[in-house]
Image (cartoon, rainbow, N blue to C red):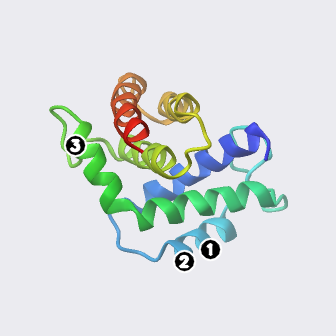
Amino acid sequence: MQNGSRRQGREMAVKVLFALLDREQDPDQVLETFWSNFRFDNSVLGEALDEALQPVKQDVRLFTEELVRGVVSHRLQIDQLLDDYSTNWTLERMSRVDLAILRLAAFELLYHSQTPASVVINEAVELGKRYGTRETPAFVNGLLDKVARGCRSAG
């Protein structure tokens, strides 16, 4: 899978995870709704299209679904890890966008050890720049650096 496809998959996963954040919904149902109602171009950022003519590339779709299902199935462990490493911030105080990005990156750090931690963190920072506040990139970078040092050195 090309790097652009992985970036696009991460971006779409954040969008789905954002929708799932406070809901106890079946991720497969949310993914099906997501894929059937939205179409994206094949650029790195996967911009939404008004016309529903262009399907998402299969490798992007599969990677997105793997990430979403992984975060959902390991959410308790991921949330505990984020809570353990965050200082002065509870998960409830974090913005919804930041939390979706952090959960995605923490999942990759824990369960995709073949992806270098620096890549995971950089991708999360880029997502934070695109979707978060001005403070998001630094916050995401600092917290994920602690998580990566803790979980990658322990595992």
Give the structural element (helix, strand or loop) at label 2. Answer: helix
Residue that numbered label 3 is attached to: 84
> Where does the image place residue 28, in percent across and percent down from the top left?
55, 75
Note whether 35 is above or below 7 in the view shown.
Answer: below
Tag 3 secondary structure? helix
**Between marks 3 and 2 in the image, the one whose residue lies nearer the viewer:** 3
Residue at x 53% of width, y 60% of height = 68
- 3D distance between C-alphas at marks 1 and 2: 5 Å
Residue at 66% across, 50% down: 9
Residue type indicated by callout 2: Gln
Q: Give the spatial CA distance, label 3 vs label 2.
A: 31 Å
Q: Which residue is mark 2?
A: 29
Q: Residue at x 69, y 44 (%)?
A: 6
Counting residues from the start of the chain, the first of labels 1 and 3 encountered is 1
Query: In this orientation, which residue lies closer to the viewer: 24 or 123?
Result: 123
Relative to 113, say whether 64 is above or below.
Answer: below
Considering every residue shown, the one lying at the far left of the view is 88
Residue 113: x and y in percent read 55, 45
Q: Could you tell me the amino acid type at mark 1? A: Glu
Is residue 81 toward the left or the right of residue 61 in the image?
left
Which residue corresponds to mark 1?
32
